[in-house]
Amino acid sequence: MNRPRSNKSHAGEHTTAGPPFPASLRFDLPASFVLVLLAVPLSLGVAAATGAPLVSGLIAGAVGGIVAGLFGGTPLQVSGAATGLVVVTAGLIAKYGWAATAAITLAAGLVQIVLGVTKVARLALSLSPAVVHGMLAGIGISIALGQLVIVLGGHAHATTVANLSELPAELRGSHFGSVVVGAIAIAVMVMWPRIPRSALVPAPLAAVLAATLASIALRLHVSTVDLPDEPLTDVVLPRIPEGSVGAVALAVVSVALVASMESLLSAVAVDKLHDGPRANLDRELVAQGAANVVSGALGGFAVSGGIIRGSANVAAGARTRASTVLHGCWIILFVVALGGLLELIPLAALAGVLLVVGLRLVNRDRVRKLAQHGEIAPYVGTVLGVLAFGLVEGVLIGMAIAVLRALYRLTHSSVRVDEESDGWRVSIRGSLVFLGVGRLVRELRRIPLGKRVVLELHIDFLDHAAFEAIDDWRGGYQRLGGQVDVDEVHDTWFRKAIGGKPGLRKTPPAPLPRWFAPWSHWQRTRPSDAADVVLPKQRGDADPMTLGMHEFERNSAPLVRPFLAELAARGQRPQQLFITCADSRVVPNLITSSGPGDLFCLRNIGNLVPVSGTDDSVGAAIEYAVGVLGVSTIAVCGHSHCGAMGALVDGTTRPGSALRSWLRHADPSLIRFHEPHGADELPVVERLSVTNVAQQLDNLLTYPAVREAMSAGALNLVGMYFDISAARVYLVNPDRNTLEPLRAPAGR
């Protein structure tokens, strides 16, 4: 009775993306043409921005496409000249020269291979997102500032500080031709996505083409791309850097770190754009390392995966890694056959493209989300550190701020003291450690002597110093005539501490978390054999429900209020009609881990579904759920130790009673129960409970609304059985009247 499973692949599954390699060429071949039109201007722009030979950027594009494309763990990711390494590479070229920088790229590739083989790729993603995105934003701003200098007609410097100091002079003496060409490129980059059907041509290509044509038409005197007559014979081979081992090692680690982070972040982002196989990050890191080894050996720029190229690949309809590999081949063909066309491109046009690309690394939506989570401090610290001191220093500054904030959160607690009608309540939240003991004791000493105090602990950690402070204050306060009740809402740190060392004193049984514990578990005073720690007494004549509602308003309501407010505004849209017994031990939201708005519940004695036309109450609920709410699933849930099923077996209901009249709807379940097949290994009452669920699923089919929805493929029927004593949920096979274990969904 269940819907057929979707063929869509899930995270973690190793499936083939799209059709086989030859069949996919009708998708991948056009995508590869789009990629080469995007990659060529980007590769030239990245190389020009650092002062590297322009052909090095094209080498990186070709090697990244072919090597990383063939062996990478993210089939639709496209690798090429590393945008995020513009600042680092410019500094390395200024310090060591290009040949030594190529050797550093080669060594960084070896480091990446080692990191991938040792399977630490996912560990790299455990770095604070605020630091990672701060690093990318800092790199982006550095790129933008350097390219702005070129647009104004100057020459970019290796550091952000130098470029900033150069800006005033460049603004005063800016070169008209460069400014016009750069402005056209920037305008096209910004406006191109807003033009209908513009996705057919990549924005960088359109920007470079428009700026180049404008410079030719207006006869502007600007610096253009300068390639050697024989590009492939002018390759600069790597040379061992001259300098201290420590400085060179730091350079290698810096290149490996930035290239790896950019590639892994891009791989994760590209993963979210398609339904194909999920990324194997360790394999991807090995492939990126291999590409950097080859690119460095050929005198090429450092290689990394890029979200700009990857998203363009997916948008162009690519199905397999063939599009990436083919685009690398087209770059080689482009350089050999069409190198003369590249020399028409103004450097200011490439700078305008890179300026926009750099600014887009500053993701405003990401900044907003980080601010919402209180992570803006490490983000800003990383950005400023990268701009002022360099990449490695900026990342270290951001990590230091992130660690300090994490330590603050782990050791921070809030203390609130409120006077109530029958005494005082002290609410403590967070982690209570020695650093907060002084403030806690000051707050406790404000409470007048001789009162009843409820010490309400919402804490996730309590160290020994904090325990002793609370215990000493509690003992002293009670000796002076006061009463202190310790009420632990979420965990039992205080009670565990009172239990003492193992074997010396018995630790009291731990109370369940308040949100699913019975009233009797937390509302009544219960003496302890280890100490006089008690739970709050019932106040006056208040019944358990009143106390429960008071607890909800104080602690739970603030947490669920946003969800309930949203549900109140848009109305309920439950996914399931959940039919179960009225037994107080069965809590639908608990056993399904659901919340407000998820389940439309129907409860009665014995989880019965009378045949259509025999009970208006149940019939109305079913018709409303299917016809009005449009639920996609109806679940019938029976349970163990069912009193209704026991009454059917024993025949203990009083003749003529309303209960006996209701249970007549279960007579078909009794008939079905005596058939030869079924769950014979279960006790009689439990077997009847399982059979009853199967019968109610059949009864649901007597309702026209249910039949019509199932015929349209819009509704599933599911049988469930909850074993109360084992706290375990089973599925019911209605064809065999048997239980089946609950299996985790694919990808979980």
Image (cartoon, helix red, strand yellow):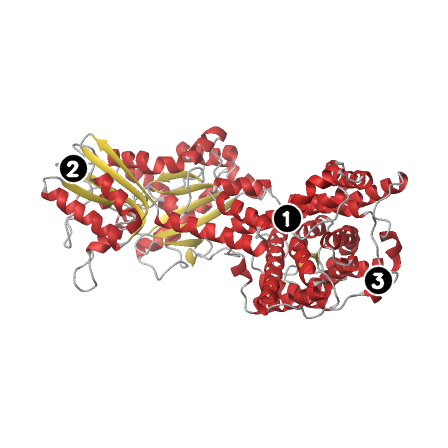
At 59% from the left edge and 65% from the top edge, which residue is drawn?
Answer: 247
| Tag 2: amino acid | Arg
Instruction: Give the label, 3 or 1, closer to the camera.
Output: 1
Answer yes or no: do the residues labelled 2 and 3 have beta carbons within 8 Å?
no
Q: CA distance from mark 2 to mark 1?
A: 63 Å
Image x and y of residue 478, in percent: 12, 43
Q: Which mark is residue 463?
A: none
Asked which quadrant contains residue 723, the reply is: bottom left
Please state which of residues 7 and 387 is positioned toward the viewer in this rendering: 387
Q: Earlier in the sequence, mark 3 or mark 1?
A: 1
Residue position marked by numbered label 1 in the rendering: 160
Q: Earlier in the sequence, mark 2 or mark 3?
A: 3
Counting the numbered discs, the total is: 3
**Dot 2: few (<14), some (14–19), or many (≥20) neighbours within 10 Å?**
many
Q: Is residue 142 left or right of residue 554?
A: right
Image x and y of residue 319, in percent: 71, 55
Residue position marked by numbered label 2 in the rendering: 452
At 73% from the left edge and 60% from the top edge, which residue is drawn?
Answer: 60
- As helix, strand or loop, the secondary structure at mark 1 comes to helix
| Tag 1: amino acid | Thr
Residue position marked by numbered label 3 in the rendering: 231
- As helix, strand or loop, the secondary structure at mark 3 comes to helix
Q: Is residue 670 visible?
A: no
Image x and y of residue 479, in percent: 10, 44
At 18% from the left edge and 37% from the top edge, which residue is drawn?
Answer: 538
Image x and y of residue 373, in percent: 47, 42
Q: Earlier in the sequence, mark 2 or mark 1?
A: 1
Q: Is residue 137 left or right of residue 510?
A: right
Q: CA distance from mark 3 to mark 1?
A: 31 Å
